[in-house]
Image (tube, helix red, strand yellow):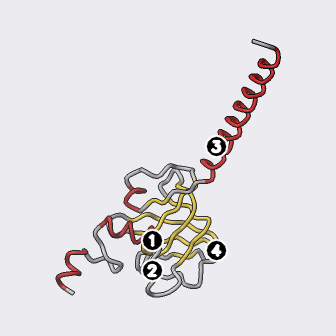
Amino acid sequence: MTPKRKKRMAFVLAVVVGVSIAVGLALYALNQNINLFYSPTQIAAGEAPVGQRIRAGGMVVDGSVKRDSSSLEVRFGLTDYEQTVTVAYSGILPDLFREGQGIVAQGAMDSDGVFRATEVLAKHDENYMPPEVKAALDAAGKTVDGKDVATSKSGG
């Protein structure tokens, strides 16, 4: 091999290694920033990783909202009408947050099985349902009000 070809080969090899490292670092960074969606049933089954940032969605359980009188801490139940997960959030809830409404919360599971939310998003009108929440309810075979899909279609 001539010296000119050796230089070209070294250059091409350096470019390939450099691009491989850049792609690897980019994929690693993207992996750290992905927040996957989990339904309460998936969380209760242990599918949600503990300590990793995820999104959870469902309906706020009626009568479950408990506010701490000395802080902004709020606890409530989140359900897909199959399973219920306790959510703890410290902060001001959105104006549209209320019991019986669909929400999506972003946060992480702790070792006690409580979802520690860092952000709570509420739907913006009566007809809107977050796509992830709708898919979780569909998978559970439930309607927005908690009835079975087969019952609501036949019984009205």
How many neighbours does mark 1 have within 10 angstroms: few (below 14), some (14-19), or many (20 or more)? few
Kindly report which numbered mark, 1 or 4, lies closer to the viewer in this rendering: 1
Q: Which of marks 3 and 4 is nearer the N terminus?
A: 3
Evaluate if marks 2 and 4 touch, with contact meaning CB atoms under 8 Å apart.
no
Where is residue 19? Give x, y as percent: 70, 37
The residue tagged 1 is 131
Label 4 crowd (10 A; few <14 / some 14-19 / many >=20): few
| Crowd band around label 2 with a 10 angstrom C-alpha radius: few (<14), some (14–19), many (20+) | some
Q: Which of marks 2 and 4 is nearer the N terminus?
A: 4
Q: Which residue is at a point 41% across and 62% down the rendered structure image?
A: 40
Type of the residue with mark 3? Tyr
Q: Name the residue under label 3.
A: 28
Q: Distance between the residues labelled 3 and 4?
A: 35 Å
Q: Is residue 152 above or below residue 44?
A: below
Q: In which quarter of the image is the N terminus?
A: top right
**Spatial distance from mark 3 to mark 2, Cα to Cα?**
36 Å
Residue designated by label 2: 101
**Nearer the viewer's eye, disc 3 or disc 2?**
3
Quarter of the image for the C terminus: give it.
bottom left
Q: In the rendered image, which residue does mark 4 sit on?
A: 72
In front of the other: 6 or 30:
6
